Amino acid sequence: MLKKLEEYEKQIQELVIASKEDLENFRLQFLSKKGIVPQLFTAFRDVPNEQKKEFGQKLNVLKNLAETKFKELQSELKSGGNAIDPNIDLTVPPFPMELGTRHPVNMVRREVVSIFERIGFTVSEGPEIEDDWHNFSALNFPPEHPARDMQDTFFVAKDPDFALRTHTSSVQVRVMENQQPPIRTISPGRVFRNEAISARAHCIFHQIEGLYIDKNVSFADMKDTLLYFAREFYGPETKIRLRPSYFPFTEPSAEMDVYWGLETEADHRITKGTGWLEVLGCGMVDPNVLRSCGIDPDVYSGFAFGMGIERTAMLKYQVKDLRLFFENDKRFLDQFKAAY
Ligand code: PHE
């Protein structure tokens, strides 16, 4: 009897079916009222007592197996089964699958990151929701600075202040708090400012900021690093100039322009007739910032810089409207296939 059970088990396990009829035959053979499984349950009554336990267990296994197998075969049949339709030619090549493109913002971010990685910068990231300390106070923003105004910053909560970060300099504060120099890092990320949306401004955009701190770092080091970047990114002949500027967290501060040219009418328009284009802000890290972050300004000095990714992409790909980067219109994105 026990041997018989095992044979049935094997038979069920190996069963393959091709049609509804096969499935129905299987059901009739094993599961219907007069089928094998119910019959075995009847036979169970006459099994000698000392075999009842083993027989009972095996019988239950068989019953479960038959039921699951039935359900499996049923759903297999519904979904078309494993059988291959002889009318389908499996050697025909598939339709070419259309590949997507990288978003231009990502393309620029990747390129800028790789340019700085090649000279030893690491990439650091931080939270998009920041406290007042990391976004403003540690960066030497005085309490009455207009950037702290609701008009410029999206506050998430007041007292304690939490806001959407307005720049990724906040990440650099976190790096300096956790690490002593030498520091060489760039921080790409999304930033938020409370601005009316137009072709030239958006309330969300992306930045890449850089930070370099060590002993004896000078303004000349900064200029050299930025020249290297400009030539890698805008071309080997690129000329740069630094104009004095102001940021609370750097002193002295500057804005870097690259020479764009004045050949076409578009050149005149983009450069406002000067031939030069502003591409990033930079400066020597203010000693107050170093001190706030636990770095001794008498021992270390450094520089920082920051650029908008969308702005950089607009220049590189001649995009006239910033809003295009956020709409994800496929017709716009498809134009970057060649660049990718
Ligand atoms: N954090 C500045 C901004 O958001 C950019 C900047 C970074 C300028 C570092 C100077 C040095 O505009």
Image: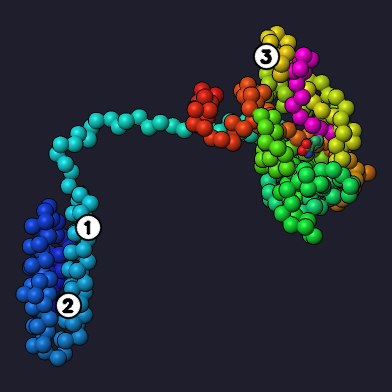
Which kind of residue does numbered mark 2 sit on? Leu
Give coordinates of residue 221: x percent, y percent.
83, 29
Main SS of the magenta segment? strand
Q: Is the CB of the residue bearing disc 1 within 8 angstroms of ligand 1?
A: no
Residue to which mark 3 is pinned: 266
Residue 2 vs 145, above or below: the answer is below
Residue 258 vs 305, above or below: the answer is above
Q: Is the CB of the residue bearing disc 3 within 8 angstroms of ligand 1?
A: no
Ligand 1 quadrant assignment: top right
Q: Nearer the viewer, mark 2 or mark 3?
A: 3
Give coordinates of residue 186: x percent, y percent.
71, 39
Residue 6 vs 185, above or below: the answer is below
Is mark 1 in CB contact (under 8 Å) with mark 2? no
Which kind of residue does numbered mark 1 sit on? Ser
Is mark 2 in CB contact (under 8 Å) with mark 3? no
Q: Would residue 197 be seen by someone viewing this image from the given angle?
A: yes
Residue shown at 12% from the left, 71% from the top: 31
Residue shown at 60% from the left, 33% from the top: 325
Task: Tell me the SS state at disc 3.
Answer: helix
Residue to which mark 1 is pinned: 75
What whole-number distance in Å separates the C-alpha atoms at marks 2 and 3?
A: 86 Å
Which kind of residue does numbered mark 3 sit on? Ala
- Label whose residue precedes the other's in the sequence (2 or 3): 2
Residue 318 in which image quadrant: top right
Residue to which mark 2 is pinned: 59
